[in-house]
Image: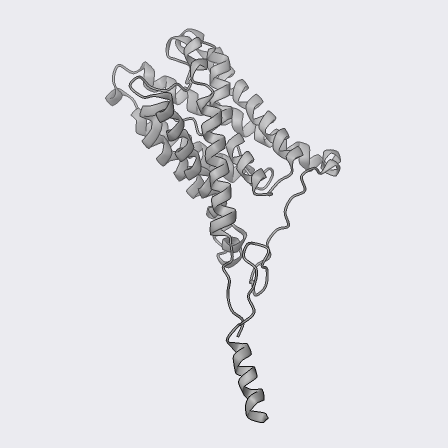
Amino acid sequence: MEGKEEDVRVGANKFPERQPIGTSAQSDKDYKEPPPAPLFEPGELGSWSFWRAGIAEFIATFLFLYITVLTVMGVKRAPNMCASVGIQGIAWAFGGMIFALVYCTAGISGGHINPAVTFGLFLARKLSLTRAVYYIVMQCLGAICGAGVVKGFQPKQYQALGGGANTVAPGYTKGSGLGAEIIGTFVLVYTVFSATDAKRNARDSHVPILAPLPIGFAVFLVHLATIPITGTGINPARSLGAAIIFNKDNAWDDHWVFWVGPFIGAALAALYHVIVIRAIPFKSRS
């Protein structure tokens, strides 16, 4: 009898208990996963921190458009690329401003400065629908004001030089432009998820401090790759602000590309992060 009982116990060990897959499996973690944000959170409308966060997004996007569109104008005014900062300078302006502005606003609003980033974080349940809509509205308003100030400084040059508006470059199809925007935004939003991951923050104390650096660098690299194709949108607020202030037909002909592409790229990055990167595989308990 004793031998048979031992065989039963050994047989039971051949089929170990399995744990669920996904971020819901919280056992044996050395960090705490933030709870999913509710879809609607009416209580936050009465909080000053909620309204302050939107103001921070407005100011950050305003400054982002002001500096970057002025840089684009400077490059286009030059007689040739060698007489200006060129494409590399434009890319550095966009990436450098994102680095600085995310660093300044991360503790207030999360430092989104981009409706596509906000949309991706919303899909991953990192913020409520109320806050996501509020952020996107404030980002778009800030972008419009930023581009408007640039036009106010140099109205004739602004209209003559394209106003920093995004268009699909001659020789490329709208499908090519859409693909470039999808992949470029995927790179950006994937970097945002990785740089702000709770697991990395818990295990590497330097990660929260350095998070703006990889995000800004991702923006820089994407601009180097896609400026010749679309002028690089990957930020619907940036594209909308320049298009409204420039307000010419060529700026609106391809404008849908700079909303559809970034939102698809952000959604794919959110799905990849939640389903693949942050998923916990089945593992056996000894």
For the view shown, which residue lies furthest in the top direction? 156
Could you say which is closer to the camera, residue 105 or residue 185? 185
Kindly tell me whether residue 141 is visible in this rendering.
Answer: yes
- Specify the color scheme: one colour
Residue at point 60%, 57% (across, down): 32
Residue at point 58%, 28% (across, down): 136
Residue at point 61%, 33% (across, down): 132
Residue at point 56%, 82% (across, down): 9
Residue 153, horizontal then vertical, whole percent: 46, 12
Residue 268, horizontal then vertical, whole percent: 47, 39
Q: How many marks?
A: 0
Could you say which is closer to the camera, residue 203 or residue 125? 125
Of the 4 image quadrants, the one containing the N terminus is bottom right
Res 140 → quadrant: top right
Residue 202, horizontal then vertical, whole percent: 53, 57
Q: Is residue 200 above or below residue 12?
A: above
Left or right, residue 46 beside residue 205? right
Left or right, residue 26 beside residue 219? right
Res 219 → quadrant: top left
Q: Is residue 190 above or below residue 130?
A: below
Could you say which is closer to the camera, residue 225 or residue 216? 225
Kindly tell me whether residue 212 is visible in this rendering.
Answer: no
Q: Is residue 112 above or below residue 205?
A: above
